[in-house]
């Protein structure tokens, strides 16, 4: 048994380490009517970059890649209404759109164009409080947008591999 185990381990090769690239995140621009999105979006994206094996978060002047995010719009549509008061929505569908501008000599991981769009969506229930639902939804949307951005930039072309 020991001979089989030793023979099996003789062909082991460790996974090739990822070459770390430097990246900076410019301040998030906001063209939407949702001012509270900037803090969670910046925080989530910075945290994800700090935990990434492919990227090292640095100051813009030291970075190989500079990401510029612009929150474009938040669309909200009522999807159900109070049967006793048809003017009062009970739930909404929200979709947040963000553009990512890749500034680098490295090719963008998503193709030739330096700009890519990312969206996230959620359903809000206005009962018991629309304000509480909006606050929770902003955090969820920021988390989903950050996850999608990290997923996009972690493609091999984005990390120079």
Image: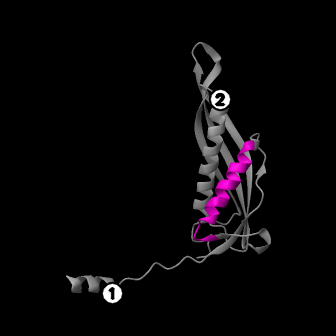
Query: In what quadrant of the picture does the C terminus appear?
Result: bottom right
Residue 103 is situated, as x and y percent measured from the top left of the image, at: 75, 67
Is 5 positioned to the left or the right of 122 in the image? left
Q: Is residue 57 magenta?
A: no
Residue 110 visible in image: no
Which residue is disc 2 drawn over?
130
Q: Residue at x 29, y 82 (%)?
A: 8
State which tag comes first along the sequence, 1 or 2: 1
Outermost residue, front direction? 2
Q: Which quarter of the figure has residue 126?
A: top right
Query: In what quadrant of the picture does the N terminus appear?
Result: bottom left
Most foreground residue, 135 or 114:
135
Most foreground residue, 110 or 6:
6
Asked if residue 11 is positioned above or below residue 65 in the image, the reply reads: below
Residue 107 is situated, as x and y percent measured from the top left of the image, at: 67, 71
Q: Which quarter of the figure has residue 46?
A: bottom right
- Judged from the image, the secondary structure of the residue bearing numbered disc 1 is loop
Residue 30 visible in image: yes
Which residue is disc 1 drawn over?
10
Q: Residue at x 76, y 74 (%)?
A: 62
Q: Residue at x 49, y 80 (%)?
A: 16
CA–CA distance between discs 1 and 2?
A: 61 Å
Mark 1 Cα-neighbour bin, 10 Å: few <14, some 14–19, many ≥20: few
Magenta part of the chain:
36-55
Outermost residue, top direction? 84
Q: Is residue 48 magenta?
A: yes
- Judged from the image, the secondary structure of the residue bearing numbered disc 2 is helix
């Amino acid at each position: 048994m020991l001979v089989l185990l030793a023979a099996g381990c003789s062909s082991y090769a460790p996974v090739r380490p990822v070459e770390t690239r430097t990246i900076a995140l410019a301040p998030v621009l906001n063209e939407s009517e949702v001012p509270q999105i900037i803090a969670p979006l910046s925080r989530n994206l910075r945290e994800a970059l700090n935990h990434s094996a492919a990227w090292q978060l640095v100051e813009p002047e030291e970075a190989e890649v500079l990401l510029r995010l612009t929150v474009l719009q938040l669309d909200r549509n009522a999807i159900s209404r109070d049967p006793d008061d048809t003017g009062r929505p009970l739930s909404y569908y929200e979709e947040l759109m963000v553009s990512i501008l890749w500034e680098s000599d490295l090719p963008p991981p998503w193709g030739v164009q330096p700009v890519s769009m990312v969206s996230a969506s959620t359903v809000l229930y206005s009962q018991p409080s629309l304000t509480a639902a909006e606050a929770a939804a902003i955090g969820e949307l920021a988390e989903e947008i950050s996850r999608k951005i990290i997923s996009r930039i972690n493609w091999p072309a984005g990390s120079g591999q």
